[in-house]
Image: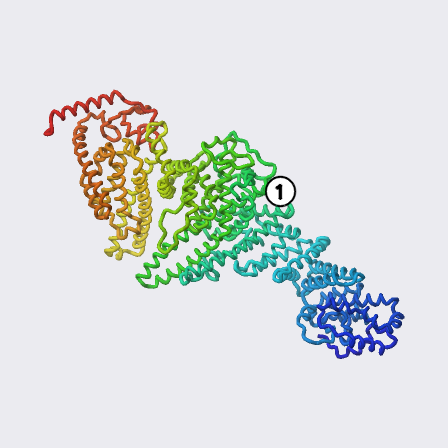
Amino acid sequence: MTDQGNNNQNISRNPFAALFSSLADAKQFALGQKHSKPPSEDSGDSQSESEHSVSDSIEDNDDSVAEISRSFRSRQELCEQLNVNHMIQRIFLITLDNSDPSLRGGNGIPSRCVYLEEMAADLDGQDWLDMDSIEQALFNRLLLLEPGNHLIYMTSCSMVNLSADRDAGEKCAIPYLYACYQRAKEEVTKVPEKLLPFAVRCKNLTISNARTVLLTPEIYVNQNVYEQLLDLFLEGVSSAQLDQVAEFAEEVIAGLLADQEVRTFGEVIVPVLDIFQGRVKDLDLCQLLLYSYLDVLLYFSQQKDIAKVLVEHIQPKDPSNGLQYQKTLLGTILNISCLLKTPGVVENHGYFLNPSRSSPQEMKVQESNIHQFMGQFHDKLHLILKNLLQQTNETRHLLLSWLGGCLQANTGRTKIWANQMPEIFFQMYASDAFFLNLGAALLKLCQPFCRPNSPKLLTFNPTYCALGELSEEERRNRNVHARGLDKETCLIPMPPQQNVEFAHSYSLLTENLILTQLTLHLGFHRLHDQMVKLNQSLHRLQGTWREAQLSGGPAAEQLREQFEHLMTVYLSTKAAATQPTMLQNCLHLQASCAALLVQLGMNNRGPDHLPLRYPLPQLTNNQLCHVPEFFVDNLGDFFIFLRRFADEVLETWAESLEQVLNFITMFMGNVERMSNPHLRAKLAEVLEAVMPHMEASSPGTTQPIVFQRQRVFCTYCHAPRLAEALITVFVDIEFTGDPHQFEQKFNYRRPMYSILKYMWNTESYRDSIKHLATYASENLEAMNPPLFLRFLNLLMNDAIFLLDEAIQFLSKIKVLQLERDRGAWDELSPDARREKESSLQMFGQLGRFHNIMSNETIGTLAFLTSEIKGIFVHPFLAERIISMLNYFLQHLVGPKMGALKVKDFSEFDFKPHQLVSDICTIYLNLGNEENFCASVPKDGRSYSPTLFCQTVRVLKKINKPGDMIVSFSLLADKIKSLADRHQQEEETYSEAPDEFLDPIMSTLMLDPVVLPSSNVTVDRSTIARHLLSDQTDPFNRSPLTMDQIRPNEELKQQILQWLAEHKEEREQMGPSG
């Protein structure tokens, strides 16, 4: 503070002393003012001080007026000059008056001011500020390096006032000018009308000087004015005064835009944006400071001029590099999440540390806290994008171009190689966090039209996806910013004769929906895949860890650390992917897209939604050929994800489930509307995901609520069509044209078994399946084999292959386990031992898979045969199913059973008791059919009376109900008697001429037919079974259907005559013969 010891001597320098006849009169006048009015402590009371202005003082001292008027033309001019001086001091906290505070009247002056000593000296004794000198004074004030060193007391009160010192001594130009602006605004509202122009001019000076500071920052030494501007906005957010800061900023921006000779507006704002980005990149999701910065960015997105600079600034230098988008300001924000910042590096990660030492409740609380912050984060992101899209056409175009370019540059994220080479992946593409957050924000933008029956949905125009390369101008004019979609595979190929009717311009709804689906395709799909793999790895590692704990040693601690590490990654990923609002928004979007695709599948081009009706209309000039497959892929991924990781969400919106069922019913079995069999097979997994749970919950877990799903599924009006669609896709995936189709089909069919089981327990679905079976029984020889007949044939093919493979793997596992337990591995080299361990693990995984699938296929046959008989006992299928059942019994209850006794059946999901029970159930279900029983002994490979006796013994051993054991014993006796009769017939048939024998099966033909192209005669049942799997002539591979074969009546009569003759001979010979 400047020393004021000699201030009393400086009164003579005061220009107003000349108004008095002598210096003594001036001192007397000042002293009178001092005694008559108490000094003000703080400049904040400017309202009361201005009321005790100089004009009042003069009124109270009429005797002095005459003296004053001799030096000034009017009393009013003096008053005006004094009031202007005081007002300038109150606004800018500067002064040229260094006189004794005790001699000042305290009339509306602040308690502290910066004394502009050099300027006072230059003005040769003038110690007041006026409108002519304020501009220079303000400039001088802004150039002071340490204004706090020039503070003086303006009143006689010398109490410490830190607030006044801080305000007057503010070093930073921008906050100082903002504070001056606020004080000037206050003056504008309070000063008398005659001072109003001066107050307004002072306010304008704060704006013009702020503009000057930002345009010429190099003048202001040791100051970063761009940081100051950003900090001013942050201060406005934290003090809930952002509106006031924005008002100041708007006027400054207007000035900057009007004067762009020195620097353009963009050159002023870009440094602010760069500082913003540098600060935000190190903030965490759960830091409150982050949300202050987002509020600042929210203002930037609302201010049209800053918004334009922002979207220009985020355009990457290399638009083809996906990672470059993450390095922009918007990308930096999108990259913030609870996922690991550096994949695989848990150190310095702030979430779910030491999970094995935390209780489930503690982890649930942490996840809930993350979800709460994510909700706020996504809300801010959504508003920022929404504001930018609502700005000028140019700003919207630039943002959408950024999004379109970003998605195209990151299309490689979905490639298989990208997930197998993470070190390259993270150098080329934006992160999972980036896409997760971008997807969440875009989902919010889609919500206004995300209702299944929203008329807005029908304005979606899929021809957008068929557009090829466009110029920048065309993209702007036609609202097309996604790129490369014309190279995507669509639901159906485009008919050659169909012309594409492109729109002149596409709606924001169309673009939003496509950009959102594409973002989910690039982001959510990979995250879901990661979670599944993490879950599997955790289960494997947990088992290995427990084994190591039992055996002791240092390996257990290492495995615990690995488990902790992996658990942290998994819990963080799960928390990021299961934010409730995000999942709800995605549910709305996917259900709405399901409804939209159904409308497209019905050729609906009207303004209102049509109800789903059968038969479906013929597709004409349909739009499905423009819808990318990733629309359906996203839908499938999402519902499968919910079933695995957020099952409770499926209960929140029953209407969405109905829309999904409609979609699955229409598309799953309909190759005309979805040509990709893999995609249609995936819909079966979606159906399993949305249907009520069948399996019992694990001990200690809560039983999931399935009320809504049960209600929707059981009352679904198109139940018969849904059951037929499921069986259709079961059959269709047998021949996908893929080189790996044989291995793939088992994975695709896995969920279908549980769906069939659930359907069978619901009357409407069961009746539809029985209807398909009845139709098949009545049309066995149709040109195209009936659907249900083909289904049963494939079901038995699968059962035979799967259980046979499972038996082989279990035999290999047993051999390896015996070797290990006997110590044979101890003598092996480390490499050889590792190879053995790897083989055991591989055989274990394969054996488990084949056991699971064989359990499902045999179980399906067991419940189907409970009410469907005719088709199973028909010669087309009877002998086949019998040979399959006997072969399995031979391994499960016969002498070969010992080869399957591995150490732990449950480890490999081997359930021999259940398999034996299901096989016996099938026998009992069909045992009342005479021709079925008569066919059992014909299985010369596996059947023997001993086999059935062994089966009865096993049924007793596994404690099956007594009535089941008795029924099976009676059936065994019945079949034995038929076997004796068959034995006699076989002896007769052995003498049959070769031309009476089937060339494929070497059995006597009872219904010979001629194949048209090869002209070979075979038995009808033989060729019928062959054509179920392969519709070609087995002798020359020519196309063949059942309606093309013709009976060989002449040969049939010869066979029947031969049988009659031999029967007569046998009867004549009698029993002894």
Q: How is the image coloured?
A: rainbow
Rendered image quadrant of residue 1028:
top left
Left/right of residue 444 with respect to residue 562 in the rendered view: right
SS for dot 1: helix
Numbered marks: total:
1
Rendered image quadrant of residue 968:
top left
Q: Is residue 254 above or below residue 16?
A: above
Left/right of residue 418 with respect to residue 139 in the rendered view: left
Q: Is residue 569 above or below residue 48?
A: above
Identify which residue, 345 or 129, lies in the foreground. 129
- How far from the left and from the top, in percent, is residue 351? 47, 60
Residue in view at x 16 percent, y 24 percent? 1062
In the rendered image, which quarter contains the N terminus? bottom right
Rendered image quadrant of residue 20:
bottom right
Q: Which residue is mark 1?
A: 476
Residue kind at label 1, given as amino acid type:
Arg
Left/right of residue 889 with respect to residue 261 in the rendered view: left
Q: Is residue 293 above or below residue 1058?
A: below
Asked whether residue 418 appears in the rendered view, the answer is no
- How far from the left and from the top, in percent, is residue 268? 67, 56
In the rendered image, which quarter contains the C terminus? top left
- How far from the left and from the top, in percent, is residue 342? 48, 57
Identify which residue, 956 or 1009, lies in the foreground. 956
